[in-house]
Amino acid sequence: MKLEELVQNLDAANPWSTEKVESIFCTKLALSRSNDSFAVYTAGPFLYEEGLVIEETHLRLKIPTNEMIRLILNLEDDTSFFTLNRIEKNWPDVQLDSSTFPRGQSWDEKRHYRVERPWGQISFGFKEHRPNCLASITFIPKTWP
Protein backbone atom coordinates (compact mmCIF):
# COMPACT_ATOMS: atom_id res chain seq x y z
CA MET A 1 0.00 0.00 0.00
CA LYS A 2 1.28 3.48 -0.83
CA LEU A 3 1.09 6.49 1.49
CA GLU A 4 -1.82 8.03 -0.40
CA GLU A 5 -3.81 4.77 -0.33
CA LEU A 6 -3.23 4.34 3.39
CA VAL A 7 -4.43 7.88 4.14
CA GLN A 8 -7.47 7.45 1.85
CA ASN A 9 -8.38 4.13 3.53
CA LEU A 10 -8.13 5.67 6.99
CA ASP A 11 -10.06 8.75 5.85
CA ALA A 12 -12.88 6.52 4.57
CA ALA A 13 -12.95 4.44 7.77
CA ASN A 14 -14.37 7.29 9.86
CA PRO A 15 -15.61 6.92 12.59
CA TRP A 16 -12.62 4.89 13.75
CA SER A 17 -12.64 1.97 16.09
CA THR A 18 -9.94 -0.46 17.08
CA GLU A 19 -11.48 -3.02 14.72
CA LYS A 20 -11.42 -0.68 11.70
CA VAL A 21 -7.83 0.40 12.32
CA GLU A 22 -6.76 -3.21 12.86
CA SER A 23 -8.42 -4.18 9.58
CA ILE A 24 -6.60 -1.47 7.61
CA PHE A 25 -3.21 -2.29 9.17
CA CYS A 26 -3.87 -6.08 9.17
CA THR A 27 -2.71 -6.39 12.76
CA LYS A 28 -3.91 -6.28 16.35
CA LEU A 29 -3.64 -3.09 18.42
CA ALA A 30 -2.36 -3.43 21.97
CA LEU A 31 -3.71 -1.37 24.85
CA SER A 32 -0.64 0.58 25.98
CA ARG A 33 -2.19 2.80 28.64
CA SER A 34 -5.52 4.02 29.95
CA ASN A 35 -7.11 6.08 32.67
CA ASP A 36 -10.62 7.27 33.48
CA SER A 37 -10.72 9.56 30.43
CA PHE A 38 -9.01 7.76 27.55
CA ALA A 39 -7.33 4.60 26.29
CA VAL A 40 -4.32 4.44 23.96
CA TYR A 41 -3.87 1.51 21.59
CA THR A 42 -0.60 1.06 19.70
CA ALA A 43 0.91 -1.08 16.96
CA GLY A 44 3.87 -1.05 14.64
CA PRO A 45 6.24 -0.88 12.95
CA PHE A 46 4.71 -1.39 9.51
CA LEU A 47 6.51 -1.49 6.17
CA TYR A 48 4.64 -0.46 3.03
CA GLU A 49 5.42 0.24 -0.61
CA GLU A 50 8.04 2.82 -1.58
CA GLY A 51 9.91 2.30 1.68
CA LEU A 52 7.16 3.83 3.82
CA VAL A 53 7.84 2.77 7.42
CA ILE A 54 5.28 3.66 10.05
CA GLU A 55 7.24 3.30 13.25
CA GLU A 56 4.21 3.37 15.52
CA THR A 57 0.48 3.94 15.37
CA HIS A 58 -1.43 5.45 18.29
CA LEU A 59 -5.22 5.28 18.47
CA ARG A 60 -6.63 7.33 21.35
CA LEU A 61 -10.24 6.66 22.34
CA LYS A 62 -12.47 8.35 24.93
CA ILE A 63 -13.67 6.25 27.81
CA PRO A 64 -16.44 5.07 28.09
CA THR A 65 -17.82 6.16 24.68
CA ASN A 66 -14.93 4.84 22.52
CA GLU A 67 -15.06 8.01 20.40
CA MET A 68 -11.74 8.67 18.72
CA ILE A 69 -9.66 11.51 20.12
CA ARG A 70 -6.70 11.08 17.71
CA LEU A 71 -5.16 8.60 15.33
CA ILE A 72 -1.42 9.27 15.00
CA LEU A 73 0.95 7.61 12.54
CA ASN A 74 4.63 8.27 13.33
CA LEU A 75 6.94 7.68 10.38
CA GLU A 76 10.46 6.40 10.85
CA ASP A 77 12.95 9.29 10.61
CA ASP A 78 15.54 7.50 8.52
CA THR A 79 13.15 6.31 5.82
CA SER A 80 10.72 9.15 5.29
CA PHE A 81 11.24 10.84 1.96
CA PHE A 82 7.67 12.01 1.47
CA THR A 83 7.98 15.70 0.68
CA LEU A 84 5.59 18.59 1.14
CA ASN A 85 5.37 18.81 -2.67
CA ARG A 86 4.04 15.25 -2.76
CA ILE A 87 1.47 16.06 -0.08
CA GLU A 88 0.39 19.19 -2.00
CA LYS A 89 0.09 17.20 -5.23
CA ASN A 90 -2.22 14.63 -3.66
CA TRP A 91 -4.12 17.03 -1.38
CA PRO A 92 -4.21 20.38 -3.24
CA ASP A 93 -6.31 21.96 -0.47
CA VAL A 94 -3.58 21.40 2.16
CA GLN A 95 -2.89 24.51 4.26
CA LEU A 96 -0.18 25.49 6.70
CA ASP A 97 -1.55 25.25 10.24
CA SER A 98 -0.23 28.47 11.76
CA SER A 99 -1.33 27.40 15.23
CA THR A 100 1.43 24.76 15.21
CA PHE A 101 4.43 26.98 14.47
CA PRO A 102 7.44 25.60 16.29
CA ARG A 103 8.81 27.68 19.14
CA GLY A 104 12.41 26.58 18.68
CA GLN A 105 12.47 24.73 21.98
CA SER A 106 13.00 21.21 20.64
CA TRP A 107 14.82 19.53 17.77
CA ASP A 108 11.71 17.39 17.18
CA GLU A 109 9.17 20.20 16.94
CA LYS A 110 6.92 19.93 13.91
CA ARG A 111 5.32 22.26 11.43
CA HIS A 112 1.87 20.94 10.46
CA TYR A 113 -0.11 21.21 7.24
CA ARG A 114 -3.77 20.28 7.40
CA VAL A 115 -6.52 19.12 5.10
CA GLU A 116 -10.07 19.82 6.26
CA ARG A 117 -12.62 17.04 6.11
CA PRO A 118 -16.32 17.01 7.07
CA TRP A 119 -15.42 14.87 10.11
CA GLY A 120 -12.37 16.98 11.15
CA GLN A 121 -8.86 17.21 9.66
CA ILE A 122 -5.84 15.29 8.53
CA SER A 123 -2.59 16.86 9.72
CA PHE A 124 0.78 16.20 8.07
CA GLY A 125 3.74 16.96 10.37
CA PHE A 126 7.27 17.87 9.27
CA LYS A 127 10.06 18.09 11.88
CA GLU A 128 12.05 21.30 11.97
CA HIS A 129 15.38 19.51 11.55
CA ARG A 130 14.04 17.66 8.46
CA PRO A 131 11.60 20.22 7.03
CA ASN A 132 10.86 18.40 3.78
CA CYS A 133 10.46 14.86 5.14
CA LEU A 134 7.05 13.81 6.43
CA ALA A 135 7.31 12.76 10.08
CA SER A 136 3.71 12.10 11.11
CA ILE A 137 0.10 11.96 9.98
CA THR A 138 -2.65 12.71 12.48
CA PHE A 139 -6.39 12.28 12.06
CA ILE A 140 -8.20 14.77 14.31
CA PRO A 141 -12.00 14.62 14.61
CA LYS A 142 -14.08 17.72 15.24
CA THR A 143 -15.02 18.30 18.84
CA TRP A 144 -18.76 18.33 19.13
CA PRO A 145 -20.41 20.45 21.84
Image (cartoon, rainbow, N blue to C red):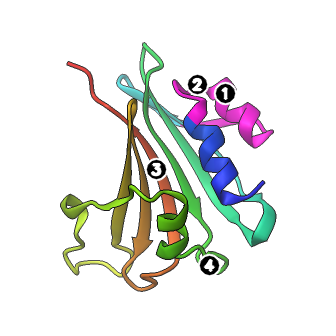
Question: Which residue carries the number 1 mark?
Answer: 20
CA separation in Å, label 3 and label 2:
15 Å
Residue located 35% across and 25% down the image: 37
The total number of labels drawn is 4
- Name the side, left or right, on which 89 lies relative to 25: left
Tell me the amino acid under the disc marked 4: Phe
Q: In this rendering, would 62 be left or right of 53?
A: left
How many angstroms separate mark 1 from mark 2 (CA)?
5 Å
Q: Position of residue 74 (x, y in %)?
A: 55, 60
Query: Which element type, helix, strand or loop, lies under badge 4?
Result: loop
Circle on res. 17: 2
In the figure, is residue 47 to the left or right of 127? right
- The amino acid sitting under disc 1 is Lys
Mark 1 vs 2: CB contact within 8 A? yes
Res. 81 mark = 4
- Tell me the kind of residue under disc 3: Thr
Q: Earlier in the sequence, mark 1 or mark 3?
A: 1
Q: Who's the residue at 58% across and 76% down the image?
A: 77
Residues at badges 4 and 2 in contact (C-beta under 8 Å)? no
Name the disc covering residue 138, or none: 3
Q: Can you tell which quarter of the image residue 48 is in?
A: bottom right
**CA distance for labels 4 and 1:** 27 Å
Give whichever of discs 4 and 3 has the lower sequence position: 4
The residue segment tinted magenta is 12-32
Viewer-closest of 56 and 111: 111
Q: Nearer the viewer, mark 4 or mark 2?
A: 4
Residue 53 located left or right of residue 74: right
